[in-house]
Amino acid sequence: MPDDTADTTDDTGSTPTDKGTPPAQALQLYLDTRRDEVSPNTLNAHRYRLQHFVRWANERGVQSMEELDGKQLHEFRIWRQDDGNLNNVSLHTQLSTLRVFLKFCESIEIVPNGLYDKLMVPTLSEGEDQRDSYLSPDLAQSSLEYLRQYEYASVDHVLMLVLWRTGMRIGAAQSLDVGDYDREHARLHLKHRPQGGTTLKMGEKGERIVTLKASTCTVINDYLEHTRKQVTDDHGRDPFFVLSDTRPTKKALRWHVHRCTQPCTWLNECPHNTTMDDCPSVGYASDASCPSSVPPHDVRRGHITHALSEDVPKQVVSDRANVQEDILDKHYDQRTEETKAEQRRKFLDDF
């Protein structure tokens, strides 16, 4: 005979009632619906942003989505900005995701009609959502020269070399297997393998072949033959980059990029007037707080900017880096207007 006192809490930690849909349950419905529509990274980003809304709702005693109104959404906006100390761009991103979530909730009739229109998302000025930080060719060269001289064919040397020479995302680097390297034809095959534990940001559309210079292949060959640890990951695959006894996480690889772009590494002194013995950021610091080090995406942005500065056709850069040309223009191209003008001069002087 069924136990009428059995626990009815669902896997979101919320107890469904006849009074409406709890925010945590609504979030789970949204994530389950979007799972096949967006990449795992995008889904995780939405989950992270919307969990703050669920936390706020729980703290405010909001028991169902049906009871929300415009005043409460405004209160959440103010709370989230203060709670996360968010700048305008971050607040815009988080509230835009919430607006999409509320529109979904309206489509399945668990919030009042038109509620998502009552959420005011801050307007961004032109260029406000663009980052201007990138790894310059000079700093990239300094890092690579140091690694070549003192850490030749190490995992850090190969990681920085591959990122700088190809402009691939850190997720793509993390997904590489030894078998993805085609030594005979000097190229890397980037593959989307969600069943094997790794994904590309653009899914199957991100799959491509990236060609390599002969000098890059020489270092890779030495790494694979003499330096790389013989490791197999949990899916029976042989990861290209190895830091310990399994495939490294993207976070771990990011730490190594931060370490490789700390100028004290090759200067042997801190450019920020800090004694290296006292600096918490030296080496593989988890907070990566060195003001001069850069994340992997800045290496990617630097590669793209450098390629464009060297007159590599935009379509070639776009295809190689797997980024649409309009996104490339908006978020990656860091050339100054003066640089662009002088590049145009090369083609137009005799016109």
Image (cartoon, rainbow, N blue to C red):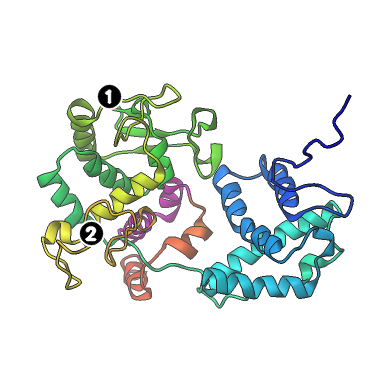
Question: Is 78 located above or below residue 215 in the figure?
Answer: below
Disc 1 to disc 2: CB gap under 8 Å: no
**Residue highlighted by disc 2:** 262
Residue type for callout 2: Gln
Q: Residue 38: x and y, percent?
A: 63, 45
In x, y percent, where is residue 217?
A: 23, 35
- Where disc 2 sits, the SS reads loop
Q: Position of residue 114 (x, y in %)?
A: 84, 66
Crowding at mark 2 (Cα within 10 Å: few <14, some 14-19, many 20+): many
Viewed as shown, does residue 150 lie left or right of 170? left
**Image quarter hosting the C terminus:** bottom left
Magenta stretch mostly in which secondary structure? helix
Magenta stretch bounds: 299-322
Kindly identify which numbered label has been placed on residue 28: none
- Is 110 placed left or right of 121 in the picture? right
Q: Residues within 10 Å of mark 1 (few under 14, many from 20)?
A: few
Q: Residue furthest top?
A: 236
* Residue 187 in the figure: left or right of residue 26: left
Mark 1 belongs to which amino acid?
Answer: Gln
Q: Is residue 179 visible?
A: yes
Q: Which mark is residue 230?
A: 1
Element marked by disc 1: loop
**Residue in the image at 56% along x and 78% along y:** 125
